[in-house]
Amino acid sequence: MPDGRRDETDAVIRHVVLLGLMGAGKTTVGRGLAGRLGWPLRDSDADLRAATGRTARQLDVERGTVELHRLEAAHLADAVAAPGPSVICAAASTIDDPVLRSALGDPGVLLVWLRAEPATLARRTRRAGHRRDLGPDQAVALAGQAAARYPLLEALRPLVVAVDDRAPSEVVTMVLAHLEAAGR
């Protein structure tokens, strides 16, 4: 059972936005969820790479963190504004933007927070060279991000799914059950 719920109105859910820190499994869960729903997937990393020819790590090194975060924010704003249904994998940095947090409050958007402990995230991110370099101690950097971003995520009242010990398929099933219960 999910660890938390967001109160939904009678609005039709047209977007499912997956939130969480780097390494939470947004892309993996997003692919499975989009496939099961038959909806397109809008993944920040893939869309940025298609638009710029660069990974998030390359953009961070070449253009700087501020520009990377601007591009990630533009991706999320564009994806949420699209009229058709989609599953959206949002970059972790987007939660820092108050305008985007407000846009995520739209009743047609189901927010799903894939919540993981910093140690889990650090273990997962060590394997991926496309992600931003967080320095020599990723667990410490991710703990700092969690301290800053988890309260912002909690304030959005998303559906919360603890993913530390869950397979992606189990997470997909949980989100689908929530959508079904909400009358999607």
Image (spheres, grey):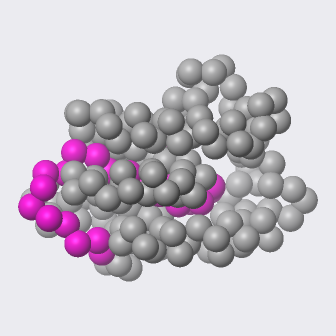
Position of 137 relative to 51 (above/below): below
Can I make out residue 166 in this image? no
Name the quadrant containing residue 82. top left
Position of 9 relative to 130 (above/below): below
Residue at 44% x, 64% y: name it.
113
Residue segment shown in magenta: 5-28
Residue at 56% x, 22% y: name it.
50
Residue 69, percent from left and from top: 63, 43
Answer whether residue 161 is magenta in the image.
Answer: no
User: What predominant SS class does the magenta segment belong to?
Assistant: loop
Q: Which of 30 and 152 is in front in this view?
A: 152
Residue 173, percent from left and from top: 30, 60
Q: Nearer the viewer, residue 74 or 182?
A: 74
Q: Which of 6 and 34 is in front in this view?
A: 6
Lateral position of residue 18 relative to residue 65, left or right: left
Residue at 69% x, 36% y: name it.
67
